[in-house]
Amino acid sequence: MKRLTATVLLVTLSSFTVFGHGDGSHDAQQQDITVKTTKISGNVYMLQGRGGNIGAIVGQQGILIIDDDYKVVGEKLRAALKDLGSVTPKFIVNTHWHGDHTEGNEMFGKDSIIISHDNVRKRLMQTNTVFGQAVPPLASIGWPMLTYAESITIHFDDEDIRAEHYPNGHTDGDSVIFFAKANVVHMGDDFFAGRFPFVDLDSGGSVQGMINNVTALIAKIPADAKIIPGHGPLCTLDDLKIYQQTLTDTAKIVQDAMKKKKTLDEIKKAGLPEKYKEFGSGFIKTDAWIETVYKSYSKK
């Protein structure tokens, strides 16, 4: 897992601006943004800007993308998509509601068909709370037009792209996207590559739900598939297995301490074994992960 570098792009940003819908205050930093494009398999690509990883498939029917980063990244994302063939995606699939994956909806919504799980549309239309701060609704132009309860398949440029809902992991509206023929899977934020994840308890997320979802996906994803995480570098199934084992083991450590009536402060002070140190070097530090686990299992 050491090959996974600290490329989780959330690290340098504040909690609120990472997951909320921005007010344009980052526009002055537009010149500092770059969008990196990586070809994965066939005509499937991964694009990395400032927020969540974007998946893209390019062909004669145009471009379909998975997530669309912050609004401030929009022009740079347009330029990257133009290099692939079109500045306007025909379809956009949102993996969940957070602004680092959906703010671009406001830029592309006029010309693109946006698709998501039912709960993503609901949350984009309402005020939500992240880290104790209110996040206003997304502008209506960015609301998904097509929604689904369990799954949807988009037949696009000779590829079957299937979005499947995995409940109550990162949020209550998470979807994982399968590019069947290209053998590529976009995990959204159920997978933070090599780092502890953000589990949005206020948006219906849960640690056990995330563990359950990742475990189910490991049994389903082909051994040779390429995996796009919500944040971090392109991964393999082995990387996902390490991530799943880490979540399972560290959650058990906290739960065992809770069974012994340890307080949250006591558990934080004890910390986690040294082998998990690198996982706590991203946006979610070790103390924050311990607190998330503690609060998540305290809800039961």
Image: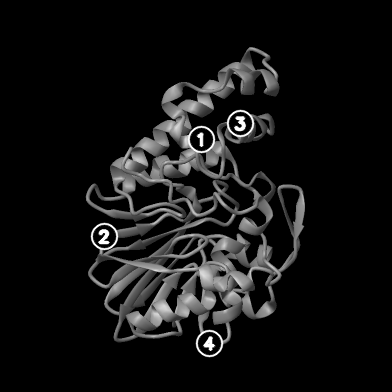
Q: How is the image coloured?
A: one colour
Q: Is residue 265 above or below residue 97?
A: above
Q: Which badge, 3 or 2, comes first in the chain's sequence?
A: 2
Counting residues from the start of the chain, the first of labels 3 and 1 encountered is: 1
* Of callouts 2 and 1, the N-terminal one: 2
What secondary structure is marked by label 4? loop
Label of residue 111 in the image: 4
For the residues labelled 3 and 2, say whether their Cβ atoms are less than 8 Å apart: no
Residue ID at (42%, 54%): 187
Question: Residue 26 appears at what percent x and percent y?
Answer: 64, 68
State whether residue 13 appears in this view: yes
Residue at screen point 50% across, 60% down: 52
Compute the Cα span from label 3 to label 2: 36 Å
Q: Secondary structure at mark 1?
A: helix
Image location of residue 168, percent across then percent down: 57, 47
Separation (CA) of disc 4 from disc 3: 43 Å
**Residue 276 image-quadrant placement:** top left
Q: How far is the residue under mark 4 from the one under mark 1?
A: 40 Å
Type of the residue with mark 3: Asp
Question: Label 1, on which residue?
Answer: 280
- Asked which secondary structure carries label 3, the reply is helix
Q: Which residue is mark 3?
A: 287
Q: Position of residue 86 (x, y in %)?
A: 39, 85
Q: CA distance from mark 2 to mark 1?
A: 30 Å
Q: Nearer the viewer, mark 2 or mark 4?
A: 4
Quadrant of the image occupied by residue 79: bottom left
Query: Under tag 2, what secondary structure?
Result: loop
**What's under tag 4, amino acid-wise?**
Asp
Residue topped by disc 2: 183
Image quarter where the C terminus lies is: top right
In front here: 295 or 39?
39
Marks 2 and 4, how far apart at CA = 28 Å
